[in-house]
Amino acid sequence: MNIGLFNIDEYNDLTALWGRCGLYYDEQDRDSRQRIEEQIYDDYVVILTLKTDEGEMVGSVVGSYDGRKGWINRLAIDPDYRGHRLAARLLEKVEELLAEMGAKVIAALIEEENTPSMAAFKHCGYEGWEEIVYFRKELK
């Protein structure tokens, strides 16, 4: 298995992986090819992929640094490849890169039903804060 930086030519493989993992993505807006391509040129965003030796994308993670905190999004491991510490390998690498950007604290928001991600984060030493309520507003 090989961890590397995402290339925009892999966009369809990335969204297919997210689909296999049950992760919602918005191809028309924030997860469009254009928006993802903009992110890969941002010095404070990193998108990593995990591929088999044959080149099949079986994992991904998005990390970003907002100047205050590192954020991990879209941790995804193909269901057929779970249970082999692959999520931990991706988390370790993205943590390293976020620390290089200046992050001292790294956080992630995980949907309540995403128990595989919760298990991976807990296994890697992350502490859950169940009493936090997330608010958001979409700007049109």
Image (spheres, grey):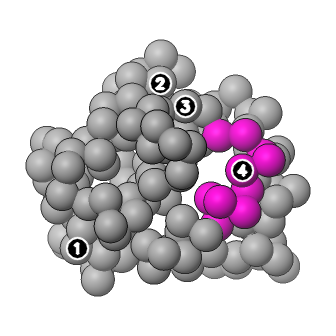
Q: Which circle's residue, 3 or 4, is located before the other in the chain?
A: 3
In the shown orientation, is residue 89 left or right of residue 28? left
Nearer to us: label 2 or label 4: 4
Secondary structure, mark 3, is strand
User: Disc 2 designates what residue?
Assistant: 97
> Gap in Å between the C-alphas at discs 3 and 4?
12 Å
Name the N-terminal-most of marks 3 and 1.
3
Disc 2 element: helix
Instruction: Provide the secondary structure element on which disc 1 rests.
Output: helix
The residue at which mark 1 appears reads as 115
2 shown above or below 115:
above
Contact, mark 4 vs mark 1 (Cβ under 8 Å): no
User: Considering only vertical position in the picture, is 1 above or below 32?
Assistant: above
User: Can the viewer see residue 123?
Assistant: yes
Where's the N terminus, which quadrant? top left
Q: Tell me the CA gap for discs 3 and 1.
A: 25 Å
Which one is earlier in the sequence, the residue at label 4 or at label 1? 4
User: Which amino acid is tagged 4?
Assistant: Glu
Q: Residues within 10 Å of mark 4 (few under 14, many from 20)?
A: few
Q: Residue furthest top?
A: 100
Residue 53 x %, y %: 46, 37
> What stretch of residues is rendered in magenta?
6-15
